[in-house]
Amino acid sequence: MKTLLVANALKKKRGNDMSDVILGESIALHLDGDGCWPDLKEKGWLRGKITSVAAMPQGTNEGNPSVTIRGELEDGRVVLLETTMRLFNTCTSAFRGRFGDLP
């Protein structure tokens, strides 16, 4: 199993109903994800699906773009996951390097 640690430390603030949001400082990127989260056997997890991805053109305090992924859980709750565009693009580039351009 190959795991990369992709890092990017930024904070952002929003003036809407969200309080200060701290963007992820790093993402563990698994290029072969089979069995990559053995802790879930003990912790459990909630099922859901990604329903939307949005680019936020000035999503960081510095005015750099970010990416928000919306997920809807089976019980109807919604979760928003956010990272910088730079970190997201680094992940997608690594996947493209591993799997190539898919049709």
Image (cartoon, helix red, strand yellow):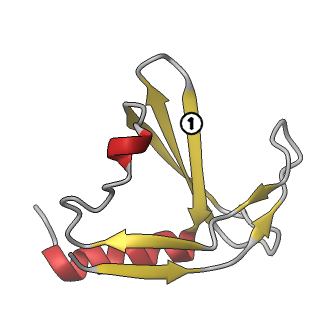
Q: Is residue 78 left or right of residue 30?
A: right
Who's the residue at 23% across and 63% down the image?
Answer: 33
Q: Quadrant of the C terminus?
A: bottom left
Q: Which of the pair 64/41 is nearer the observer?
A: 41
* Image quarter of residue 18: top right
Q: Is residue 24 above or below residue 94?
A: above
Q: Which of the pair 43/1 is nearer the observer?
A: 43
Who's the residue at 85% across and 40% down the image?
Answer: 16
Q: Quadrant of the N terminus?
A: bottom left
Q: Which of the pair 42/83 is nearer the observer?
A: 42
Label 1 crowd (10 A; few <14 / some 14-19 / many >=20): some
* Image quarter of residue 24: bottom right
Q: Secondary structure at mark 1?
A: strand
Q: Where residue 59 appears, x then y in whole percent?
A: 71, 61
Viewer can see residue 42: yes
Q: Is residue 19 left or right of residue 89?
A: right
Q: Where residue 99 appears, x then y in whole percent?
A: 14, 74
Q: Is residue 102 above or below residue 8?
A: above
- The disc labelled 1 sits on which kind of residue? Val
Who's the residue at 33% across and 57% down the image?
Answer: 37
Q: Is residue 17 above or below residue 97?
A: above
**Residue lying farthest top?**
75
Q: Where residue 77 appears, x then y in whole percent?
A: 55, 23
Q: Where residue 67 appears, x then y in whole percent?
A: 56, 58
Q: Is residue 6 left or right of residue 82?
A: left
